[in-house]
Every structure is written in C-alpha cells, then in structure tokens.
Amino acid sequence: MAAMMQPQIILLKEGTDTSQGKAQLVSNINACTVVADVVRTTLGPRGMDKLIHDDKGNVTISNDGATIMKLLDIVHPAAKILVDIAKSQDSEVGDGTTTVVLLAGEFLKEAKPFIEDGVHPQNLIRSYRTACSLAIEKIKQLAISIEGKSLEEKKHLLAKCAATTLSSKLIGGEKEFFASIVVDAVVAIGNEDRLNMIGIKKVPGGSMRDSFLVDGVAFKKTFSYAGFEQQPKKFLEPKILLLNIELELKSEKENAEIRLSDPSQYQSIVDAEWNIIYDKLDKCVQSGAKVVLSRLAIGDLATQYFADRDIFCAGRVTEEDLQRVAAATGGTVQTSVNNVIDEILGTCEVFEEKQVGNERFNIFSGCPSGRTATIVLRGGADQFIEEAERSLHDAIMIVRRAMKNSAVVAGGGAIDMELSRYLRQHARTIAGKSQLFINSYAKALEVIPRQLCDNAGFDATDVLNKLRQKHALPSGEGAPYGVDINTGGIADSFANFVWEPSVVKINAINAATEAACLILSVDETVKNPKSESAQGEAAASAMGGRGRGGPFRGRGGRGMRRR
C-alpha cells in the first residue's frame, strides 16, 4: 500500500516529449528512408532531375544530391544526418552525393526487420563496422593505379573520369566536350589547392558548345566612365598594375573646418585635391604599366587621363578576380602607388577585351605563373547554366582527386556488386548472428546497380541476376562488369571507360556506414517543450505580456509599467 502512495517523480519539465525504445528507432529509420527516396531517382546517367521551388520564389533544377538535400527543408532530427553526410561528401570528394544518401538509407532499411525482431542495435552496429572495413580493404585491392603515365595519357584517363561524372548530369549530352575543358582547367592550375583558382563565368545565350576555356583569367567588363571607349582594348605583353585604392577626386572626409583670411587661398586648397589625384595618376603611368586594375573605383578623371596615355584601366574588380589575376600574372596587389617597382607588376602574353554574347570580357591569356584558368559557360536558360556550373564543379573535384589519389575503380555498379559478392562470401565463414547482419549489408550495396536499372527503365531483377552470375565466376574475370545503360544488359565498365576514383567510393561507404550506425545507436529522443513554444513566447513578450494571462494582464504587462 505504501508503495502505491509514493508520489510520481518528475524529472523533466511538463510538456517534454520523450519517445524511446524500438518504436523510436523504427520511426527514425522510416524518416531516413523517406529522405533517401527523394533523391533515389536522380542516380546515374538516366536519372531524373528535381525542380525545387523555395519560399522566396527561386526555382532550382538540379540532379546533384547535395544541392537537393541542402534545398530540402528537413525538420526531422534523425533525417538531418543524411543531409550532413551529403554535404561532407560534396566538400571532400565532390561527387557521389546521391550514392552516399542512398547507401545510408538502404543500410537502415536492411537493419529495420532485425530491429523489429528484437536484435540489439549494438550487434548490428558492430557487424556493419566490420563489413565497412572489409569493403574498403577490398576496394583498395581492386583499384587500378593510373600513375607513371605520360601527361597526354594521364589527361586522356582523367577525361574518362570526368565524363563518367558528367554522364549523370544535365550536360551529359556534351560530356566529352566538357570533360576535356575540365581536365585542361585542372591541369592548368597544377598542384594549387585553392579551387577558386578555376573561375566559372556564366553568360546566357548561345549553345553549350559555345562555352570555352581561357588559359588565364577572364572577367566581365566592370562599370566604366566616359573616356573608357578611347582606351586601347588589346596589348601584347603588357605590364599589369593591381591596386586596392580609389583613383577619384576626394573631398575632405572628417568635416574639417578651414578658415581663410584671403580668398586666393581657397584656390590653393582646391588645387591641392587635384594635385593629389594627378600625383597618384602620374606614378601609375611612370611605373610603365599598360593595364591598371583596382578593387575600388577609378573615377572619370582617371579614366580619361589613362585613355590619353594609351593605358587600359578597370575599377571595382571583384576581390576574387583580382586575386586570380595576381596569381596568374605574378603581380602583387598594392595599397599605395608610391615606390611602384617592376617586381610587383604582373605580365601576360596577351590582354584583350572581347565580346561574349551580350557581355564584354577582359581576358588575360598566356600568363607566366599559369596557376589559374577560367571556364566561360554559355547556354539558354539561367537555371540550365546554374546546373551546368554545379555539374562542372563536381567534375573538377573528381579530376583533382583522381590526380592526387590516382587509383580508379570500375563504375556502373560494378564495384558495388563485387563488394556485395565478397561480403556474402565472407559472411559464410562467420558463426553466429553477425553472419546475417553482414549479409544484409552486402544486400544493401546492391541498391546502386538496382537503382541504375530502375532509373533507366530496365528490369532490375533480370540485370542483377546476370551481374550476380558474372561476378560469381571463380576466375574473377567478372569483377569489372556493371550495368550497361545503353543496352539494358551488362558490360565491362573498365573497357567502356566508366571509371570513378576509388576515393569517391571509399568516402561514400565510410560516411554512409557512419550515418547508419549513428542513427541505429539512438534509442530516445527528448524534445524540449520550450523549443516548440519559443515562437509563441517571443510573440507574447514582444507585445509586453507576461506570458500567461495575455498581454494586458493587471495594470498592463511588464512592458507597460507606468514610469
């Protein structure tokens, strides 16, 4: 009786939502499966695109897993983990973002029946981690190095990797054309780690094939004053002066007060302003520079002054473009025009201003340092050019990765099928429950070739059976076989040049397993009631209320006390 009379102990604030146990785990798994289903259809060369319309009215058409995940406003706390792994895959490798989300979703889907049958999540997690390390070891064994080849051969091989990435994008129809542009751009920047050394400029109009690569820097003509058209628009081997100062008439800023005893003194003050600007301009001219670029404004007086002396100038050049010009031409950005020496001036073989579509571009080519390149993208609709830029970003990342870690594996679902076969085989050597778990992990890996078939409209069961049969050959000759998107059968991915850097797969499997294990290890969600009613309280306090009893309780709420 005494036990029944004990009061209930309340640890958490009233209204706290706690859900725990098996039901909570299953609910998290379901949420992640729903997210994976969103991007499922975008995988592969025949993947569909998503049109995302946000609350500001912006429309994005994309096939890139990371872009879609960022734009989806996901509120479920567990499903947000999938967004994070897509972002990390994008920043680390650049491609394989859809793959990573799909794999994580599939690992969880395979784990769900075990959880419902009462298996402890930690057993699953342990087996998944073992399977993950086995799979990564196997990838390293299967990878083929492209090291030690001549530059031309290497370029050819890198173009194949870029073409594989681009084949699943909106610009897949012109993948060979863009693959060679991307490889040339990445080879141009060499070992430079900063990705912003490859500029991508978008110019609406024309067709995709009108896109071109500038071996140097190109940027849009900046805002210009009168006198600009009188300046020469082409130079051979000019010296280039880069500034971060204004070349404009400046009046005194600090509200200075000047008392004059003689009206003639006023003229000397006005002249002083003119002398300062002329002094700056003279120093620019004496430096021998033929092209003057500044991050700040170059006024009408300076523009005309330079035009009279056959010097080209451009003001308000963006920081990024100015840094790229500095890196390419070997110049240094100056914050003063005093003591301008030859060492700080940049140079290039040809500078010219050129019309591209509706825009005029300033183009520096044949730069001595050559650690930069610019891709000028053309196309019809703005959304199309935006998507082309995202696709090229993925391809650039892949080519950079392939140059640094020069091992490639067969794409088209071949590596996934081989890993699946290897893990199933390994599972047979293990006693106990973990055999089942590693088997389910192996089954989950088959989602990639299955989805490639589904997205292309082929019979997935039929193709997977052929693949399993091929990969099961004891000689191991079936290892590079993957889905043939063109015929609906199977083909040797290596022979067809469907390659991807092994680092993409390693990163994807690692991240997907990590995410799956993280979600499986959560068995309780505690939701603070304050977070839900925070907006309501904020609104109430803004009206001056005390929270309860409305805004005008008593003699006016807190905000209305009489003073």
Image (cartoon, rainbow, N blue to C red):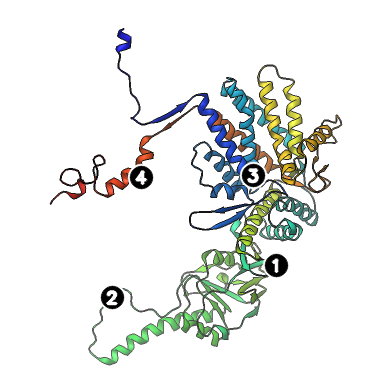
Q: Which residue, given by chain and number where applicable, does mark 1 sit on?
A: 207
Q: Earlier in the sequence, mark 2 or mark 4?
A: 2
Residue plotted at (59% across, 67% down): 325
Residue 521, visible in the rendered structure: no
Q: Earlier in the sequence, mark 3 or mark 1?
A: 3
Q: Nearer the viewer, mark 4 or mark 3?
A: 4
Whole-number angstrom distance, CA of label 2 to CA of label 4: 46 Å
Residue plotted at (59% across, 36% down): 33
Instruction: Residue type at mark 3: give it.
Output: Thr
Q: Nearer the viewer, mark 2 or mark 3?
A: 3
Say what secondary structure mark 3 lies in. helix
Question: Vertically, is 256 above or below 307?
Answer: above
Instruction: Residue type at mark 2: give it.
Output: Asn
Residue plotted at (67% across, 16% down): 432
Q: Which residue, given by chain and number where applicable, does mark 4 sit on?
A: 535
Tell me, yes or no, whether the two marked residues, 4 and 3, touch with CB atoms within 8 Å: no
Mark 1: give few (<14), some (14-19) or many (20+) Cα within 10 Å: few
Whole-number angstrom distance, CA of label 2 to CA of label 1: 55 Å
Q: Is residue 105 left or right of residue 145?
A: left
Q: Earlier in the sequence, mark 2 or mark 1?
A: 1
Whole-number angstrom distance, CA of label 4 to CA of label 1: 49 Å
Tell me, yes or no, whether the two marked residues, 2 and 4, touch with CB atoms within 8 Å: no
